[in-house]
Each structure stands twice: as C-alpha cells, then as structure tokens.
Amino acid sequence: MWAYPRWHNAITANCTTTIRSQRSIAARSPWDLRILKNGHIDEMFYQRGLLSTGGLPFGELKQRALINPEAMAADQDPEFSRRIRAGRPGFDN
C-alpha cells in the first residue's frame, strides 16, 4: 500500500505510459509521441498493424468502429455485445 496518493499526470503517469511501463524494456513498443496525445494511439496501432482492419483505410475503419448509435439502441439488450460488433471489421459476424 502507498504511504501517499499517486496522482495522474498526463505526461509521466497516464493510462498508456503506465501500461507500457509494466512491460520489460525489451518487450515495450517503440516510443511514439502519440502515446502521450490522447486520441491518437488508435492511429499508431493501425500503422503498426496491431488492429484488425479488414483492409480498410484508417479513416473509414475509425468511422465504422464508432458504436455509439448502436450501443444506445441496444441499451439493456442481453445481446448488447453481439449487436455492437455486428458488421464491424475484426469480428466474426
């Protein structure tokens, strides 16, 4: 247990840098400024081939990945997970 609070810091201790630091140095992904820039890590993953793209360009893939309308429509549906994935690249449909 910590004797003092650990504070979030957008540069030195954010979600991405903390997860990255838990891997051995040899296993870490190469450093990229997009690790610090919220909203850009998806593009980095795309360029590194870490996403299932279905052969789509990044812009179209990102647009097709937006689940908000389907998630709102599915709300409490027991099939929520299936519904938000239907027709999206990277999922068996």
Image (spheres, rainbow, N blue to C red):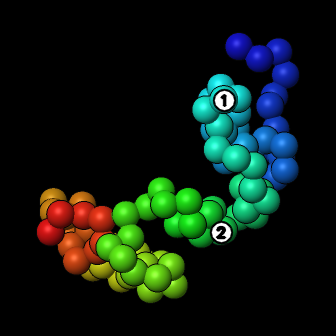
Q: Amino acid at mark 1?
A: Ala
Q: Is residue 68 left or right of residue 10?
A: left
Callout 1 secondary element: helix
- Between disc 2 and disc 1, the foreground one is 1
Residue 4 screen position, x and y as percent: 85, 22
Residue 39 screen position, x and y as percent: 65, 68
Mark 1 highlights which residue?
Answer: 26
Q: In the rendered image, is residue 45 in sight?
A: no
**Crowding near pointer 1: few (<14 within 10 Å), some, many (20+)?**
few
C-alpha gap between disc 2 and disc 1: 26 Å
Q: Amino acid at mark 2?
A: Gly
Q: Is residue 61 left or right of residue 40?
A: left
Residue 6 screen position, x and y as percent: 80, 31
| Residue sitting at x 14%, y 69% | 93
Mark 2 highlights which residue?
Answer: 39
**Crowding near pointer 2: few (<14 within 10 Å), some, many (20+)?**
few
State which tag comes first along the sequence, 2 or 1.
Answer: 1
Badges 2 and 1: C-beta atoms under 8 Å apart?
no
Callout 2 secondary element: loop
